[in-house]
Image (spheres, grey):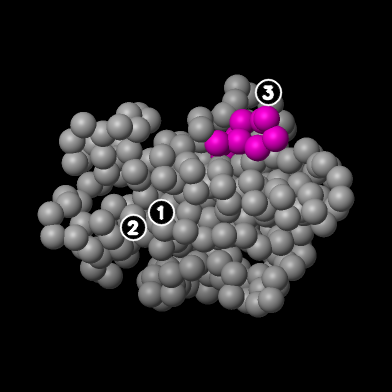
Amino acid sequence: MSSSAETGMLALDVGSSRVKIGWYPPNVACLSPSQPGALPIVAPSLPLPDPAFAVTHRDRPRDELSQKIRQGIDPFPWQRAHCYVASVYPEVDSIVENILGDQTCFLAHTDLALEIRVDQPDRVGIDRLLSVVAANRLRRPGQEAIVVSVGTAITVNFISADGAFEGGAILPGLGISAASLNAGTSTLPHLSTASIEAPPEPVGKSTSAAIQAGLFWGAIGAIRQVSHRQRQVSSGQTKKEISRQMFATGGDARLLVDHLGIDGSPAKYIPHLVLAGIAITAEELR
């Protein structure tokens, strides 16, 4: 069978709330060269989808979701392409498979060129692992890195100096935290994360402003503290100081990235890190 560089490739990242879809046209599915970019947004040596889009699946009827996905991919000649899927939401898998048919290839942790140093590798979200696969293309050789994904959940994942996934931390995302405040109290309103357009004042002058401040600065503080603790654990094991990098991805990462970093370096924002990991893995499997 021909390679994805010859036929194109469709990559689907089925997350907890959205299906992210990236199209890699024929002869463009190869790695793009590294270009200098202004931080915190970086132009990396990664497979870049052209284009990429997302479809919300949470609370959407199956027929409507299927129609939205079909409408999104119809402009591309995906019927002749390879289709790779990374999913952490099994309820959507049958919809995707029904659309893509025999071309569907669901990725598992055993497909990845990645050492996974945790107790149950098969229980780790494939999106977390693929983000590490992609980050390893950006990570400076011999240096540790942290990948922060800010979506439905926030994950802080640690990469060893030799490129292994060492595990990490999982905490509620901004949306889940906002919904929990509303559901668990009698008077606090439910705020959409879309209402947070800029870093809010830490001293909120209204209930809504106070919730925005808590959501935003609470997430920043949690990520900083977890990454700091991970750094301490690593330094204690290696008995030496190692410079590290931080990469941020996910739907809400752009909100937070200006306030994140490690070892004096700002975090680099990578919009489609999981899709890039899918593309890298697909090329290695061909």
Looking at the rendered structure, the secondary structure element under dot 1 is loop
Closer to the N terminus: mark 3 or mark 2? Answer: 3
Crowd band around label 1 with a 10 angstrom C-alpha radius: few (<14), some (14–19), many (20+): some
Q: How far apart are marks 2 and 1 (CA)?
A: 5 Å
Mark 2 crowd level (few <14, some 14–19, many ≥20, 10 Å Cα): some
Q: CB under 8 Å between callouts 3 and 2?
A: no
Residue range of the region highlighted in magenta in the rendering? 260-270
Q: Are marks 2 and 1 in contact (CB under 8 Å)?
A: yes
Whether residue 263 appears in magenta in the rendering, the answer is yes
From mark 3 to mark 2, how far is it between C-alphas? 36 Å
Residue 173's tag is 1
Foreground mark, 3 or 2?
Answer: 2
Mark drawn on residue 176: 2
The amino acid pointed to by label 3 is Pro
Q: Distance between the residues labelled 3 and 1?
A: 31 Å
Looking at the image, which residue sits at the far left? 187
Q: Mark 3 points at which residue?
A: 36
